[in-house]
Each structure stands twice: as structure tokens, then as C-alpha cells.
Amino acid sequence: MRKRGILFVVTGPSGVGKGTVLTEVRKQKDVYFSISATTRQPRAGEQEGIHYFFLTRQQFEQKVAENGFLEHAEFSGNCYGTPAEPVDTRLEAGEDVLLEIEVQGAMQVHQARPEAVRIFLAPPSYEELEKRLTGRGTETEEAVRRRLETAKRELKLAPEFDYIVVNRTVEQAVSDVLAIMQAESCRAERALLDAR
Amino acid sequence: MRKRGILFVVTGPSGVGKGTVLTEVRKQKDVYFSISATTRQPRAGEQEGIHYFFLTRQQFEQKVAENGFLEHAEFSGNCYGTPAEPVDTRLEAGEDVLLEIEVQGAMQVHQARPEAVRIFLAPPSYEELEKRLTGRGTETEEAVRRRLETAKRELKLAPEFDYIVVNRTVEQAVSDVLAIMQAESCRAERALLDAR
């Protein structure tokens, strides 16, 4: 029988660099990257089933009612969620799955799938995150302030995760995430052993 | 304050390749490798404090009485043990420590230091271990048979360890052990986080 895949959840505050780190991880490791569902309109260039599964609000609510999401939330009037079915299909086929979600969603996944391996990507310091978010220059002072308030709350949740990877450099963070994925596949409760 | 080092215990049945794998790990990672104490006579070329700490039986028993070993056992009339003090000194200084010990000793270390990360090095199969042990050609059939009996018992203990690394190739096993060491340093309960 084939081993079941491992579900890896990577989260962290806005601006910490989740996207950059995971793009690099996916180049180096063959893993199914979960695609979110959303009720927001596709932006230019976004494709169904590649960037998002685009759903109407009615379809989304139907799926919520059927318990079809590992986690879901509403942001600025749009719903986002992680459909359970594609994830579970891959896991059952023995494939590892990677989720990139925000912190509250990661907490929800822990409820839905307690066996998930949860990685918190943290900035080297709060000041560093502040610098990164301010440096973007694409948002109002008020929006940055709100993000930082949220980040402060989220950083306090880090100890509840299995791993904390500090994003000092992208190379180091990528190497840490890859090491965690490799090490978890050696966990005794998962390893198959021909111990007759 | 400096982080405390991590204690890694690597074990596995006789013939599985612990020595070969760990020699390579130590070339690639800076880690303090624990030196055992023994009451047996030094063999040609063996140096005090490099290969072993050589003790008289009286000295050894004194140390046992003082709870000075993380584990100890007797084999063919000689005592062997892992002195606690050099290990604890390194851990307190923030250095990681690697112990290579036999399976019963590893179980004892778990009692003495429950926070130790315990890795079981396993053969790809029982048949493969049989082949390796027989192939040595340095022992009587009876000695090999006894080693295999012990190995069979020990393999059953593998699920009690934190990790099981299957020694299919030395390269893969070394890479797995290094990944485990790196991942463990990211464990949330150990990571320091500046989460103000």
C-alpha cells in the first residue's frame, strides 16, 4: 500500500514573504500546491483552476454548507476558501500537498486536519516587517497601520504552530522549509518499516 | 540569551550502517559527537578522550552511583556509558550534540533526557540486514545468528522513536539525518521569536 501524502500548511503575516519563499520551494520539490476558491472577479490574466477556482457566492455558500472547505474566510466583501476535495485526493494518492494561507485560515485547517504540518513564516523582527510593509509604497498609511496591527496579533500565534521558519534570507527560509518537508517524511508514525 | 543546543540520538541494529552514515553527517555539519566511557582495555591506536574515556571498573561504578551517565550497559564483561557532563556542557553552550548508541541505550537516554530527538536508522528490509551481517565474514554463524535475533527485537522498537531513517543508500540516509537536524532547529518550541 502506498503511503499517504503529507499536508503542509505555510502561513505568516502579510508582507513576510510567503509567496517568494514558496515559489522557490515548488521549483525544488515536487508537491501539489493547493488552489483557493474565491467569489471575487478574476483579474486580468487570472485563469480558472490555475490561479483560483472562481465561484459565485451561491456556489461558495453551498460548498460551505457541505463542509467542502478546509478553511474559508471573507475579506473586503469577497469569500476565499481551500476546497477539501482536491487536497484529499492528492493525499490519498500519496502526494504531498502545500497550502499557503493566512494565519486565521491555518488555525482553521488545524481543526479540520489535525495531522497537518503547520509552518509559521516569521520576520526576523517586528521592525523588519514594518520596514517591508512600509517599503511597498502601494498602500495608504492607514492600510499599513492596520496590516501591522494584524501582524502583531498573528505573531503571537506563532508558538502554536509546529515549526517557525524565520525569513532572514530567502535561501535560508527555502532550505528550512525543504528540510522540514524531508524530515517529516521520516517521522516514525509515517515511516513504513519492514520489521518482521 | 543563547538558544540551548539540541541532543540528537542515532541508533539502529548492529550492521545497519550507523558509523558510516554519521561519519559523513559530521563532515557536513558542525556538531559535538559524544565520546563513550568504557572499562575495556584500549586497543592499539585508541586514544583517551578521542575514541573513548577509559575508566577502571571502580571509576565507572562510582560514576553510575553519581548518576553521571545518560545511559550505560555491560557487553561481554565490559561496561560502556555516555558521560552526561560533556553532553550537558555543550547543550548549555548552545551546541548541538550527536550520540551514536545501541538501541537499549537510546531507550535509556529517552528516560534521562525526554527532550532528546531520537532517530532510528533502519535497514531497507530484514533480509538486507541479514545479507550485510553475513557478508562481513568476520564472525561465526552462531554470532551472526545472535546479532540477527537482537536486530529483530530492536526493529520492533523503531516506532517508539521520533524518526525512522531507512538506510537505502548512504547519501539518502545522510541527507535525511541532516534534514532532521535542520528541521528540529525550526521547531516552534525551540525557535526564538521577537514577537512584541
Image (cartoon, coloured by chain):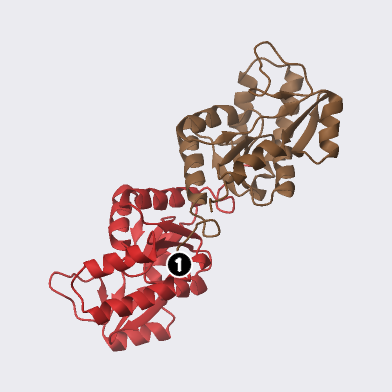
Chain colours: A red, B brown
Residue B75 in the image: x percent, y percent? Answer: 79, 27
The correct choice, above or below, for B7 with respect to B145 in the image is below
Which residue does the numbered mark 1 point to in the structure image?
B195
The correct choice, above or below, for A186 with respect to B145 in the image is below
Please state which of residues A104 and B133 is positioned toward the viewer in this rendering: A104
Q: Give me the residue at 55% from left, 48% from top.
A: A191
Q: Residue pushed farthest front?
A: B1
Q: Is residue A143 left or right of residue A160?
A: left
| Residue A80 in view | yes
The correct choice, above or below, for B152 with respect to A189 in the image is above
Task: Give the chain of mark 1.
Answer: B
Q: Residue pushed farthest top?
A: B44
Quarter-of-image position of residue A151: bottom left
Residue B119 in the image: x percent, y percent? Answer: 60, 43
The secondary element bearing badge 1 is classed as loop
Residue A121 in the image: x percent, y percent? Answer: 40, 61
Please state which of residues A116 and B150 is positioned toward the viewer in this rendering: A116
Q: Is residue A56 left or right of residue A34?
A: left
Q: Give me the residue at 66% from left, 34% from top.
A: B13
Quarter-of-image position of residue B17: top right
The correct choice, above or below, for B132 with respect to B29 in the image is above
